[in-house]
């Protein structure tokens, strides 16, 4: 029997989209955008639309495990409590640590922080949010005296100029980008994108500034000089600022100096400065390209300064705007989930704040100093200083820089606990105890999005197996350790305590205050509508914008204007390239959820390396060939994607692939462990590496109804397809027995009937296996990257194949009566590049016309710039082979 629709919140990026999830009678769940939610008004991106396809129990962790063996909850929790208590007794409270996640709900986060800082008495709790927004937190606290995002999403729609710096909003926050694009259609909003790469966002920009990595400080300090020198400072706002008269413009870089330090032309610099200066309503959106830097805090300060001196903050259509990468990065900040913060935005260094929190909690102790930040935390594990570690909802063996060292640390740690949804990740394999956590759709709580909007996540599925909510697991361990204060009846009670602490002895002295909800009961919590903080006691509504009239949270209530020094460009070895890492449109973090959805793997089915054509020629790298990227002892192997959207001398590699999906695709194994000295955030955007061609004796593509066997392959990348799996692989050594290799690779049933074509002189092998007349596996081998219609082959898996059709399988294409879709470009509607090309060839001359013809671009809209590029390039080759040269900039082997 079908259930009623449940209003909840998307578990992906920090936009915080509202979702209506409706369970159906057949066990499926229908996902739709919530038209009433003020973050998205019904819009969803490709990942959000595919959430119903991620709810399978396949691969779920459904029972506790101790040393790999199934166990009951009592045994597992008793062991966790005992080992943590023993470590504290024998080595002190700093010998234990929690590493948590922006995937946790605020209630989970709150209790984890309370347990560590208020009962264990140490601050060794940090979060994977350290990797994405710690520099923004540090910059906010440095300038505002508090970690406060001043504006709201409506400002993007009311601005005259929107500057996107270090933010590929079109791919990483697609719903916000579509709100921005709709505003441009209505009111002519101009868009400037500051990014070393020509991203999908840059394709839509009125001006793209392809600056050098870490050139942001020079650019925005130069902008500050321009604003002051041209009289753009706001005298009416100057009274809210401290230090404005002390700024020496002669110490700031002029246009020529900015150009020299950023790699931009003087004309580009001057145009940006003048557009910013002449536009009163300016919003500067920044994200990981700013934060993930060894000078990220300085970048944030440089941006804030420009808005502060012009008074362009806290009013409609203006302000600096940090957009977060995780659904509850903001909620984690609110409860003190970072090692250098207390709960409710109080400072751990403040003795009065510590005493206040301890008194509120009635806790036996309180942490007296900041704990270890993420990178330092895992170094301490390597140094045997951490004796017990609890990881909750994250995969540091893939996501942290220097991830090979992280793996070694996990192996060496005396006791590792992992709470997770997925049984097998690169991290769970190192756990002594595994605890099955509730997944999205099964747990209740709240999350806070990038505009300070708190929304409910509501359960619409029953808890499977022995899975439990994180807050309940944490509370049980705390009580087993002998601590009181963790007897909450449910998440509503935890939220009420969190809200009460936010207003406790506040009186307007702290930015975070949701005292209006301090007495909330279970019914009120169930019906809680999205609201923006602050919302103090007695307030009917939340607060969309702050700081329009000053009121900062420094001792004198004035904002600070620290002037960062532009980064001095390091001297780079001519043999090295600057490695930049980041997200792609349809994947999420380490792919434990999105990697199971075939259409989300359709755009890029294997890890890749974007490289400029000039660099590819110099290195002898052909389109779609394999490359090795190395730094020191670490090396990864990737598919080359040659594109002029990448700056010469620099390469881009996505962050998502793990050992579950590729042989050597964990790019963070290469990333240096250097961090920002203030925020502790790693610099994922600028690591020096060596690039070289990967020489292979043979390349192969295979499809199989069962998971292929990848053991012993020099290179492989696996992706789900509709009927099973698609596999790219390559090897350095010749294969003597291709039939035996094909059978072993595809794990085909021994009774399968094989049909084959061999051209040994040219190194071509094509084999297909049939069982009961249906295709169960096919293998295609070539000396070069294989040219076949991958979407056709994937779609044929499990289908009946009469004799004549079997030749099409060996040919690797469907024929003129079954044209292939090609690589998926529009994941929302599952439309491939070949179908889009056919629509263009048939006369569709605009993106909307293409959408009308085949549906592409009519979902979240994040592919619209790519469709426009195809139209502009008149890319109308419509044969059914997924060729190995780039097609409108989008070639990847698995289609």
Image (cartoon, rainbow, N blue to C red):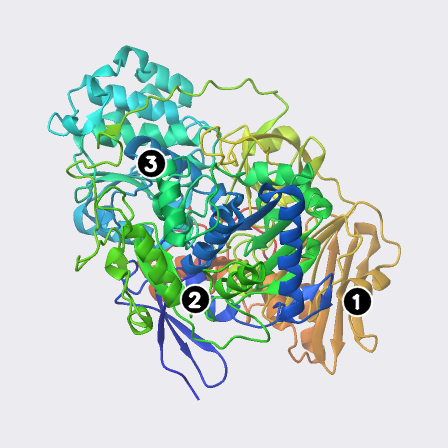
User: Which numbered circle lies on residue 756?
Assistant: 1
Q: Determine whether, in the image, residue 741 is placed left or right of residue 669.
A: right
Which residue does the image show at 40% across and 53% down from the upper left?
361
Image location of residue 691, percent across then percent down? 65, 33
What number is the disc on residue 140? Answer: 3
The residue carrying pointer 1 sits among few (fewer than 14), some (14 to 19) or many (20 or more) residues within 10 Å by Cα, namely: some
Q: Is residue 52 left or right of residue 610?
A: left
Q: Reply above or below: 676 against 572.
A: below
Depth check: give the residue in front, 598 or 248. Answer: 248
Task: Confirm whether residue 842 shows in the render.
Answer: no
**What element does badge 1 sit on?**
strand
Q: Quadrant of residue 705?
A: bottom right
Name the residue located 72 percent from the left edge and 81 percent from the top edge: 773
First along the sequence among labels 2 and 3: 3
Outermost residue, bottom direction? Answer: 1
**Lower sequence index among marks 3 and 1:** 3
Closer-to-camera residue (461/53): 461
Percent x, y of residue 434? 65, 61
Where residue 680 appears, as percent x and y from the top left, is 49, 34
Disc 3 to disc 1, C-alpha distance: 64 Å
For disc 2, the neighbor class at 10 Å (few under 14, some 14 to 19, many from 20) is some
The Cα–Cα distance between marks 2 and 3, rounded to whole angstroms, is 33 Å
Q: Determine whether the residue tagged by mark 3 lies in a helix, strand or loop.
A: helix
Which residue occupies the extreme right position in the image? 736
Whether residue 588 is visible: yes
Q: Which mark is residue 488?
A: 2
Task: In the rendered view, tell whether residue 410 sits above or below residue 744.
Answer: above
Q: Pick the quarter of the image with the C terminus.
A: bottom right
């Amino acid at each position: 029997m079908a259930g009623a629709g449940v209003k909840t919140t998307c578990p992906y990026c920090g936009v915080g989209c509202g979702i209506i999830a409706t369970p159906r009678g057949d066990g499926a769940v229908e996902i739709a955008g919530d038209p009433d939610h003020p973050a998205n008004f019904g819009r969803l991106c490709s990942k959000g639309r595919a959430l119903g396809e991620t709810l399978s129990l396949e691969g779920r962790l459904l029972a506790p495990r101790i040393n790999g063996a199934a166990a009951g909850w009592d045994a597992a929790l008793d062991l966790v409590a005992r080992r943590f208590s023993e470590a504290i007794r024998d080595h002190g409270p700093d010998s234990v640590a929690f590493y948590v996640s922006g995937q946790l709900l605020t209630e989970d986060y709150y209790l984890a922080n309370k347990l560590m800082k208020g009962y264990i008495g140490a601050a060794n709790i940090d979060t994977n949010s350290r990797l994405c927004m710690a520099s923004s937190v540090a910059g906010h606290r440095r300038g505002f005296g508090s970690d406060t995002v001043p504006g709201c999403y409506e400002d993007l729609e009311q601005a005259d100029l929107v500057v996107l710096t270090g933010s590929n909003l079109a791919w990483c926050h697609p719903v916000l980008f579509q709100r921005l694009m709709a505003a441009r259609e209505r009111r002519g909003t101009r868009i400037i994108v500051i990014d070393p790469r020509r991203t999908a966002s840059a394709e839509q920009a009125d001006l793209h500034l392809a600056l050098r990595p870490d050139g942001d400080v020079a650019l925005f300090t130069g902008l500050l000089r321009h604003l002051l020198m041209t009289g753009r400072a706001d005298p009416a706002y100057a009274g809210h600022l401290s230090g404005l008269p002390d700024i020496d413009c002669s110490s700031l870089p002029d246009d020529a100096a900015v150009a020299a330090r950023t790699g931009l032309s003087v004309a580009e610099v001057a145009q940006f400065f003048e557009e910013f200066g002449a536009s009163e309503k300016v919003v500067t959106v920044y994200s990981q390209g700013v934060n993930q830097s060894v000078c990220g805090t300085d970048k944030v300060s440089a941006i804030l300064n420009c808005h502060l001196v012009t008074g362009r903050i806290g009013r409609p259509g203006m302000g600096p705007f940090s957009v977060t990468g995780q659904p509850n990065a903001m909620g984690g900040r609110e409860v003190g989930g970072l090692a250098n913060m207390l709960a409710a935005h109080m400072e751990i260094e403040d003795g009065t704040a510590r005493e206040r929190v301890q008194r509120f909690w009635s806790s036996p102790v309180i942490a007296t100093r900041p704990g270890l930040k993420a990178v330092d935390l895992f170094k301490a594990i390597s140094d045997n200083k951490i004796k017990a570690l609890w990881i909750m909802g994250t995969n540091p063996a893939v996501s942290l820089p220097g991830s090979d060292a992280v793996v070694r640390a996990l192996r060496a740690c005396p006791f590792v606990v992992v709470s997770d949804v997925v049984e097998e990740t690169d991290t769970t394999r190192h756990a002594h105890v595994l605890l099955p956590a509730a997944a999205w759709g099964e747990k209740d709580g709240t999350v806070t999005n990038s505009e300070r909007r708190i929304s409910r996540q509501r359960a619409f599925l029953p808890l499977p197996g022995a899975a439990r909510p994180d807050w309940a697991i944490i509370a049980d361990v705390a009580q087993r350790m002998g601590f009181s204060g963790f007897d909450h009846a449910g998440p509503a009670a935890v939220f009420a305590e969190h809200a009460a602490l936010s207003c406790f002895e506040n009186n307007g002295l702290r930015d975070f205050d949701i005292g209006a909800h301090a007495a909330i009961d279970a019914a009120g919590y169930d019906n809680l509508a999205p609201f923006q903080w602050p919302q103090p006691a007695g307030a009917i509504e939340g607060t969309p914008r702050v700081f329009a009239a000053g009121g900062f949270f420094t001792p004198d209530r004035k904002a600070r204007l620290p002037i960062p020094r532009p980064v001095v460009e390091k001297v780079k070895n001519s043999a090295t390239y600057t490695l930049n890492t980041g997200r792609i449109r349809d994947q999420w973090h380490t792919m434990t959820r999105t990697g199971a959805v075939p259409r989300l793997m359709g755009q890029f089915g294997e890890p890749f390396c974007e490289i400029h054509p000039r660099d590819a020629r110099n290195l002898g790298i052909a389109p779609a060939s394999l490359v090795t990227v190395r730094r020191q002892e670490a090396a990864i192997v990737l598919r080359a994607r040659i594109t002029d959207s990448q700056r010469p001398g620099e390469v881009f590699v996505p962050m998502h692939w793990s050992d579950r999906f590729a042989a050597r695709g964990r790019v963070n194994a290469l990333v240096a462990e250097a961090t920002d000295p203030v925020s502790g955030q790693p610099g994922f955007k600028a690591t020096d590496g060596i690039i070289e061609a990967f020489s292979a004796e043979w390349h192969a593509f295979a499809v199989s109804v069962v998971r292929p066997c990848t053991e012993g392959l020099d290179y492989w990348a696996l992706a789900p397809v509709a009927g099973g799996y698609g596999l790219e692989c390559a090897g350095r050594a010749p294969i003597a027995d291709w039939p035996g290799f094909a059978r072993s690779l595809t794990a085909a049933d021994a009774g399968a009937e094989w049909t084959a074509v061999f051209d040994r002189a040219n190194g071509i092998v094509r084999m297909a296996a049939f069982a009961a007349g249906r295709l169960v596996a096919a293998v295609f081998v070539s000396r070069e990257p294989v040219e076949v219609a991958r979407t056709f082959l994937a779609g044929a898996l499990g289908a009946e194949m009469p004799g004549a059709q079997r030749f099409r399988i060996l040919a690797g294409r469907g024929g003129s009566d079954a044209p292939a879709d090609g690589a998926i470009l529009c994941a929302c509607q599952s439309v491939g590049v070949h179908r889009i090309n056919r629509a263009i060839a048939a006369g569709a001359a605009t993106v909307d016309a293409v959408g009308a013809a085949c549906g592409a671009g009519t979902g979240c809209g994040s592919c619209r710039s790519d469709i426009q590029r195809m139209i502009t390039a008149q890319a109308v080759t419509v044969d059914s082979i997924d060729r190995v040269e780039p097609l409108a900039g989008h070639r990847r082997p698995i289609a």
